[in-house]
Image (cartoon, helix red, strand yellow):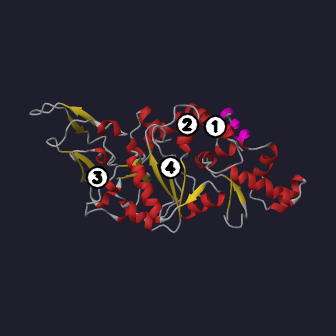
Amino acid sequence: MAERHGQGRSARFRKILEFMMTPQEAELAVRLPKPTPELAQELGLDVATVDGLLERMYKKGVILPRNFQTHETFRYTRSVGQLHDTAQSLWNIDVFTDAEKKQLWGLWEDWVRTEWEPERVPKYNDQPAPTQRIVPAYKSILDSPELLPSEDIRKMVKAANLIAVVSCSCRKRKEAVVKPCDKSHDMNCLQFNRSAEYAINRGHGKKLSVEETLALVEEIEDDGLVHCWGNSDAMTINTFCSCCSDCCMMFQPMLEMGVPITKVYAKSRYEARNNEALCDGCQKCVERCNFDAISMDKVPGFKKLKAFIDEELCMGCGVCVLVCEPLSLKMALVRPKEHIPSFVAAPRSAPSPQVASA
């Protein structure tokens, strides 16, 4: 099973799979997507027993059904990234004890930091174009008349047929081995449409209304998390991530290894600008920025240090604007609408920050 994900030589990845599946469950997984009666015959089990084992593996996040309502035709997770997300998003899932969940997250953290990140992150330097895009906090650009539908969180949420929220796999992995992230929200990974259907059916996601979703988005923004989704003008998305540089499986290693964030994430069309005359030098924006784009500099004519925005590093997320009490920070539109690529249906590209969609 490790070989299927290109990890046949990894003892650490094997430990993850051994923790998540019994030998009998692994025997089933390797035979998927064969139908249940055929699996039962090959393993010498009755159909009811096989059904029970498959359901347990589904709850664990190692397999997914083609149809979430009938649970027909289970298959093994298609990629390492998908397994990373499904196997660690365990809110309301009781197949593991709390102690076992923490142990599992620790195994993932060990493999990710020791093997996966050093192998995959440098390759982002060769990526021809960013697959994801930073989305400005909508409270930071409410008054912008130029806001496009595909960068307006409110419109994107309202365009979804079904919405759910799940716990952030990256954050849970970090909590297992280091001090918990100071961001208060654990349930902050929004799923839409088919991904939401999966989350609700498996049980690790909570169904949300449009109003509940927008209220949660406001809380997430107040928490200082950075919104991102696919880099196109498509109005349908599967996953809406809200990330920080402490935990994110993309932000953290890229910043640590010196790989430009822009290799994977396109900047938003907006950029933070500071009115030095209004700035009181509180430095809250410096602490808030996930990309080290803000520093405090001496400005002629002023006694206090003033916030300076590095245009090269600013990704246009807008979370700094939300904590600026003197209102000196504003979001400025600096890129044309053509900055956001037109949606073109294409084969699935990898990797992306969240790949839990089924």
Mark 1 lies on a secondary structure that is helix
For the question of whether residue 222 can be seen, the reply is: yes
Residue bearing mark 2: 175
**In the rendered view, would you say 150 is above or below 108?**
below
Q: Which badge, 2 or 3, is on the more N-terminal residue?
A: 2
Mark 2, mark 3: which one is toward the viewer?
A: 2
Amino acid bearing label 4: Ser
Q: Are marks 2 and 1 in contact (CB under 8 Å)?
A: yes
Amino acid bearing label 2: Glu
Mark 4 lies on a secondary structure that is loop
Residue 18 magenta-drawn?
Answer: yes
Q: Which badge, 2 or 1, is on the more N-terminal residue?
A: 1
Crowd around label 4: few <14 · some 14–19 · many ≥20 (10 Å): some
- Say which quadrant the N terminus sits in: top right
Q: Which mark is residue 240?
A: none
Q: Which badge, 3 or 1, is on the more N-terminal residue?
A: 1
Residue bearing mark 1: 102
